[in-house]
Every structure is written in C-alpha cells, then in structure tokens.
Amino acid sequence: IPKINLETFLPTTLNYIQQLDDIKNPYEKMAVFTKVSEIILNTLNFCVGKVEGGVDDTLPLLLFVIIKAQPKSFASNMKFIELYYNDLGHGPDSQRFAILTAIQERLLHFTHSDLVNVSEEEYRRNCDQQ
C-alpha cells in the first residue's frame, strides 16, 4: 500500500464533496465527483508514480474522502443524479456513477466487524456522536 500524504488532496476534495447539497444541477453534481476523482488520481500519480487510474486505485481513497466529508444528503444526491442525468448509461460518468453506487452500498452496510483495531465500544460511541 503506497504512502500518501493526505494533506496533498484531502482539504480540497472534502470541500468539493461538502458542496454537493448546494448544487442543483445533476451534471454539476457529477462534475464534483469527476473533479474529486481527478484530484485523487493526480495525487496517486504524484506520490507513487504513474497509476492506471482504475477502480482498484481510486475507490479506496474516494470512499475515504466521502466518509471524511460526511455529506448530509449523499443518498439523495445519488438518486437525483440517477433520475435526472440523461446520459448516465454511457462513458466515463457511467463508470464513475457505478463506483459511487458501490461506495453508497458499502456505506449502507458498514458495521463494526469491517474495522480493524477499533473496539466495538469505540465504534458505537463514534456512531452515537454523528
């Protein structure tokens, strides 16, 4: 697993994700995820050299960014994009949306047993704080 300096991309990507609720256009919402994915890929290229940019490279960091950003209406934004983005079945945005859907499913079914080095008590305490 490559070492990545989170300060190189985290503040910018968190800012983009946290602005999702303020955006009213499904294409602009999708553009946020495109921009965040590009930032992650550029960071990977900078930190570890040229990467392919596939799901295996970007999904873990995109999941991390979404968890850290804690978007209030992530599921609603996803549904909005699904309903009103006309060309979602084609091209890179289709692939990106599939990745985001996988992330959403992962978050919906996340449990304590998915974590390493976190006690169940600490997990419940952190969940209660949200």
Image (cartoon, rainbow, N blue to C red):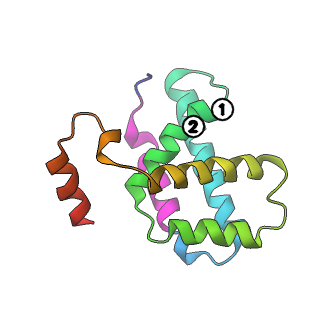
In this view, 127 is above or below 47: below
Position of 6 with respect to 34 (left or right) is left
Question: Residue sitting at 66 percent across and 72 percent down?
Answer: 80
Labels 1 and 2 touching (C-beta < 8 A): yes
Location of residue 64 by image quarter:
top left
Quarter of the figure with the N terminus = top left
Is disc 1 placed on a helix, strand or loop? loop
In this view, 61 is above or below 101: above
Q: What amino acid does circle 2 point to? A: Thr
The mark nearer the N terminus, 1 or 2, is: 1
Marks 1 and 2 sit apart, C-alpha to C-alpha, by 7 Å
How many marks on residues? 2
Quarter of the figure with the C terminus = bottom left
**Residue 53: mark in rendering:** 1
**Which stretch appears magenta?**
4-18
Question: Residue sitting at 14 percent across and 50 percent down?
Answer: 121
Residue under label 2? 58
In this view, 8 is above or below 20: above
Asked whether residue 5 is in view, the answer is yes
Q: Residues within 10 Å of mark 1 (few under 14, many from 20)?
A: some
Position of 103 with respect to 3 (left or right) is right
Name the main secondary structure of what is drawn in magenta. helix
x and y percentages locating residue 38 in the rendered image:
63, 44
x and y percentages locating residue 112 in the rendered image:
29, 46
Question: Residue sitting at 59 percent across and 31 percent down?
Answer: 56
Asked whether residue 12 is in view, the answer is no
x and y percentages locating residue 6 in the rendered image:
39, 39
